[in-house]
Image (cartoon, grey):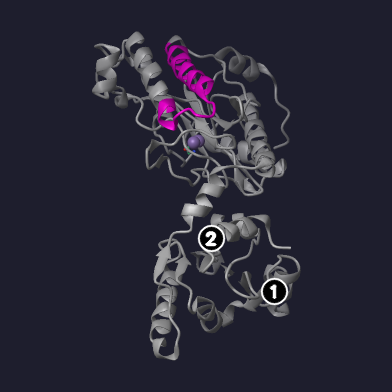
Amino acid sequence: MKPARVTEFLQKMDPQSVAVFVSAHEIRRNHDTDFEFRQDTDFYYLTRLNEPDCVAVLAPGHPEHQYILFVRPRKREEEIWTGLRTGVEGAIREHGADAAYEIGQLDVVLPKYFHNVEKLYYRFGQHGDFDHKLIGMIKYIREQVRGGVFAPTTITDPATILHEMRLRKNADDLRDLRRAAEISAAGHVAAMKHCKPGMYEYELEALVEYIFRKSGATGVGYPSIVGAGFNTTILHYNTNQCRINDGDLVLIDAGAEYNVWSGDITRTFPANGKFTRAQRAVYEAVLRANKEVIALVKPGESFMKLHEKAVDVLAEELLQLGLLSGSKQEVIAQESYRKFFMHRTGHWLGMDVHDVGRYKVEDGWRTLEPGMVFTVEPGLYIAEGTPGVPAEFYNIGIRVEDDVVVTESGCEVLTTGVPKEANEIEATMKESVMVAV
Ligand code: GLY
Ligand code: MN
Ligand code: MN
């Protein structure tokens, strides 16, 4: 049987068209060692085929083959080194292809599926080598025009269909996303319980990722950010090499990847288990923004409204803290809040941590629909030496990030497994931890 997403995509294509999706390939890390393989997300979403060097073709108007796979051949001498392959027979038997070929036949066979088809769905820019190959094939078909053959005249991005599908998660997707979020939360809880001044950031990174793998995740959805002190104020800090000192805040932004679905959680806590007055004040400001944004999430709400709410709350709080002056209207209109809050409040979440899907559609910012999943992650970042800031606020970088799914009546927060109230965090940090590391 064809994968459900292939069938759905076929139904949404123009009848006289062909779509081509290319898998990821192995990438050299150094000398003769490759990076860990990660499948191209569009390819995996459609096919569930987790091998390099494959091509999937969808051809709704073809008389016999609507779903065609090109795969690596079965070769005992290679499989003995790198594992069993699907092969041509497996592509048909296990993956529901109507026809399958060895990838080595691509140059000869693929152009035939383009003959006399007006429209080709292909996403340029993802796989540079393949872009050139495809252009060559089309050029070659054009040259055969006197033989009664014509090449596609329109090449269009399949994202218009596929990324709209990926934006709306179904029950199976949500089951895996819930698990990714649960595992992510468990990693953060372990870090809170284990953290002590004098440890190094990488020790917490190792612990969080140990919990992910131990819980059945394949790894991380993105490089873990574990920053202490000044490093909490660097948005995408992930070298994770520094000592965690008494009095520091620790910011961890880490998410497990489970079945190719990613969690994305940030928590910030005091290294010694007790927030200072200034740390707690800034923490409460960010937490309020996080909670007020989440309270807005329901079908029909504009995605942009969520960011505006975070800005509104944080502007108010920054004035209250004495870190900005003027009126709230001025702070918002002049964007002076950007000195401390310089990123967006959230992003779509799914098989990619920054998942696909447009944020703006023809008539403005997208409105929320059930099944959409995104992060809510306001933050404030006050680096040492920031002009006009009292020293007690130095090196306070705080982000509180949760993952939410829009439901029929509101939203479900997927990341409740890790505390975010300041008192709860302090209580959790008092609990002793028995982690076998
Ligand atoms: N971890 C990247 C982000 O939160 O967007
Ligand atoms: Mn995020
Ligand atoms: Mn994050």
Residue drawn at (72%, 71%), measured in percent from left and top?
92
The alpha-carbon separation of the residues under discs 1 and 2 comes to 27 Å
Secondary element under disc 1, as helix, strand or loop, is: helix
Q: Quadrant of residue 425?
A: top right
The answer to whether residue 287 is left or right of residue 60 is left
Secondary element under disc 2, as helix, strand or loop, is: loop
Q: Position of residue 276 (x, y in %)?
A: 47, 12
Q: Position of residue 245 (x, y in %)?
A: 48, 25
Nearest the eye: 38 or 330: 330
**Which three-letter amino acid code belongs to the residue tagged 1?**
Gly
Residue drawn at (42%, 12%), measured in percent from left and top?
278
Residue drawn at (52%, 66%), measured in percent from left and top?
19
Asked if the stretch drawn in magenta spans residue 299, the answer is yes
Numbered mark located on residue 87 in the image: 1
Position above or below: 88 against 334: below
Q: Earlier in the sequence, mark 1 or mark 2?
A: 2
Q: Residue furthest right?
A: 93
**Which three-letter amino acid code belongs to the residue tagged 2?**
Met
The answer to whether residue 291 is left or right of residue 418 is left
* Residue under pointer 2: 13
Q: Position of residue 312 (x, y in %)?
A: 37, 18
Numbered mark located on residue 57 in the image: none
Position above or below: 73 against 97: below
Residue 360 visible to an observer of this rendering: yes
Q: Magenta stretch?
A: 278-306
What is the quadrant of the C terminus in the image? top right
* Within-10-Å neighbours for mark 2: few <14, some 14–19, many 20+: many
